[in-house]
Amino acid sequence: MTDPCNRRSSFPMRSALIVSVIAALIGGCGGDDDNNSLPVVRRAAIQFQGQVNGQDFVCGATYENVGIGQPGTYQVTDWRFYVHDVALIKADGARRALDLDQDGVWQYENVALLDLRQDCGSGVLPGNAEVVGAVSNENYTGICFKVGVPYALNHINDATAPSPLNNSGMLWNWRGGRKFIRIDGMGAPGDGNNAVAFVVHLGSTECPGSNPNAPPTATCGYPNIAEFCLNGFDADQDRILMDMGAALEASDVAFNTPDTASGCMSGNADPECIAIMPRLNLDFTYIAGAGAAPEQYPRVIPQRLFSVRKP
């Protein structure tokens, strides 16, 4: 048997987990202290859960008192979103990045897709409600993550992109990139002609270029990537709640401005986005039309879209 104390690695160490195992073996050579062999990383599975006004999300369910106006009923039929740059936070503010498992389905490089739909009435769907990886074995008191896809990955060709960046339901076009958040819903469902499709699709806007089927020629004017940091988070037992009721609290989900996209699709000329984008932890610039002066709407502080759920 090869002596691990004398063995040399002949391949690139691409995972923090591999580094930890080798460090543990080396630390145990020639010493009597068993503590030297403790791994320097541990596993972490960050759990997410959807809610609407404090009620657990069930695909296809109708929720009451959503937003403003009447009747305030809202049915949700899709709930997916990307996160990246997930990091656990120590008490002194130091960050330790989560080295994501490269599972070939839900996670790629530093990006993960959360799909909370489960069953939307047509049978059980493949879903994912966690971000899984390795992190240094230390004490943590919080977590930070960004909602969206980083620019370098957001605008790669969807025809050749690895999963989950090839998820067809999360694509706009090559120039625009991916939907960072996809919430599909219906305001006043079942109310005949009063029912209104009202969605929240977050993504980058003002991505320059003349061809929608080619990558942008420069960075997007409005990347629309928001970072969220939560204190008092225990990765071993807590969950992260995403409550779309908070994002829609100032919206009339049973009304949509004529000749505009349904709900808010991040457009800077869409009046429905004025109430929503700042509640996604983003500053929003509204431009009513050609020649109109830009109107600035700062993010709503403190953000209430994400919170920590204790067991």
Image: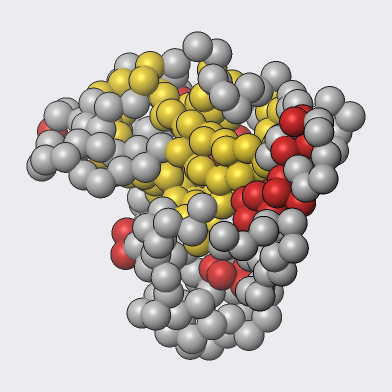
| Residue closest to the eye, 108 or 31 | 31
Q: In the rendering, at what x and y percent does residue 257 appear?
A: 41, 47
Against 289, residue 174 (above or below) is below
Q: In the rendering, at what x and y percent does residue 262 appear?
A: 36, 50
Picture residue at 63% right of the left edge, 37% below the top: 42
Against 202, residue 276 (above or below) is above
Residue farthest to the right, as pictured: 92
Q: In the rendering, at what x and y percent does residue 201 appear?
A: 44, 51
Q: How many marks?
A: 0
Picture residue at 49% right of the left edge, 69% below the top: 177
| Residue closest to the eye, 28 or 263 | 28
Residue 304 as seen in the image, left or right of residue 20? left
Q: Quadrant of residue 220?
A: bottom right
| Residue closest to the eye, 14 or 163 | 14
Against 86, residue 220 (above or below) is below
Quarter of the image for the N terminus: give it. bottom right
Q: Is residue 37 visible?
A: yes
Residue farthest to the left, as pictured: 122
Q: In the rendering, at what x and y percent does residue 203 appear?
A: 53, 58
Picture residue at 38% right of the left edge, 16% below the top: 55
Against 215, residue 137 (above or below) is above
